[in-house]
Amino acid sequence: GGLIGTPVIEGLYGASGVVYTNVFLVPMRILAYVAGEGIFDPNSKKKTIKQVVINTMTNKVVLALVIGILLAILNLQLPVFVKNAIGGIAKCMSPLSLILVGSILADEVKFKYSEDIKIIGLSLIRQILIPIVLLVCLRFIDMDSMVKSIMVLLVGMPIASTTAIYANKYHNEAGFASKAVFISTITSTFTLIFVMFLIELFLI
């Protein structure tokens, strides 16, 4: 949702769309940094609930999100030079993540037909089936159509590069994870067009 989702939403809906995007992604990001990292890190299973909560609330990404939301709610403006610096760094993150995924692909990936078909199937479930289910549910909820559209688009985004980053960090099948990110990103070129067509047809 963050790597490709945020630029896509910004291009379609502007700054207000980005705000909705970041609010929608808060629980998903918390889950990623708790349950997601726990899948790769065996030591995380030994942590108590208190340690998990503290680690989550002190996570840099979560802290940044909370600060950003507070600034938006309180209508506070950062100094221009700080805002420009943060904006410049943020624009570097997506390319850097993809460079890392690409470097892992170049070093470790071997494409296998049976494995790749499974990844494509998984990608289609994630990028078409889940958005359709959410779209059907949202038809019965009274909510702004732009917010509905953003939610459907975000759940239809490709597998997050965080998957490959975690796998690489914890030495846990980084090649497979990078391949999943790569294939789902390629398929998203087509699936996102289809999802946007459905949004126009049923939500707008």
Image (cartoon, rainbow, N blue to C red):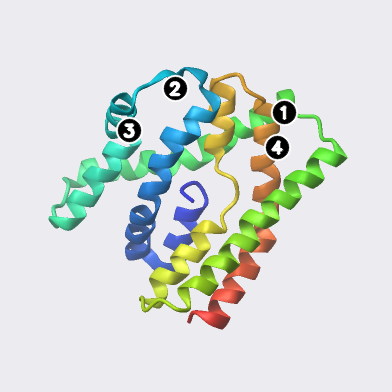
Decide if residue 148 is on the left or right side of residue 65: right
Residue drawn at x 48%, y 28% is 38
Q: Earlier in the sequence, mark 4 or mark 3?
A: 3
Residue drawn at x 32%, y 33% is 56
Numbered badge on residue 56:
3
Per the image, the residue denoted by label 2 is 44
Q: Earlier in the sequence, mark 4 or mark 1?
A: 1
Which amino acid, by three-letter code, is at mark 1?
Ala
In three-dimensional space, the C-alpha distance between marks 4 and 1, rounded to whole angstroms, equals 10 Å
Please name which of the two marks, 2 or 3, marks the residue nearer to the observer. 2
Which amino acid, by three-letter code, is at mark 4?
Lys
Q: Earlier in the sequence, mark 2 or mark 4?
A: 2
Per the image, the residue denoted by label 1 is 106
Choose between 50 and 184: the one closer to the eye: 50
| Neighbour tally class for label 4: few under 14, some 14-19, many 20 plus, Cα within 10 Å | many
Q: Are marks 4 and 3 in contact (CB under 8 Å)?
A: no
Per the image, the residue denoted by label 4 is 179
Residue drawn at x 22%, y 42% is 81
Q: Secondary structure at mark 3?
A: helix
In three-dimensional space, the C-alpha distance between marks 4 and 3, rounded to whole angstroms, equals 28 Å
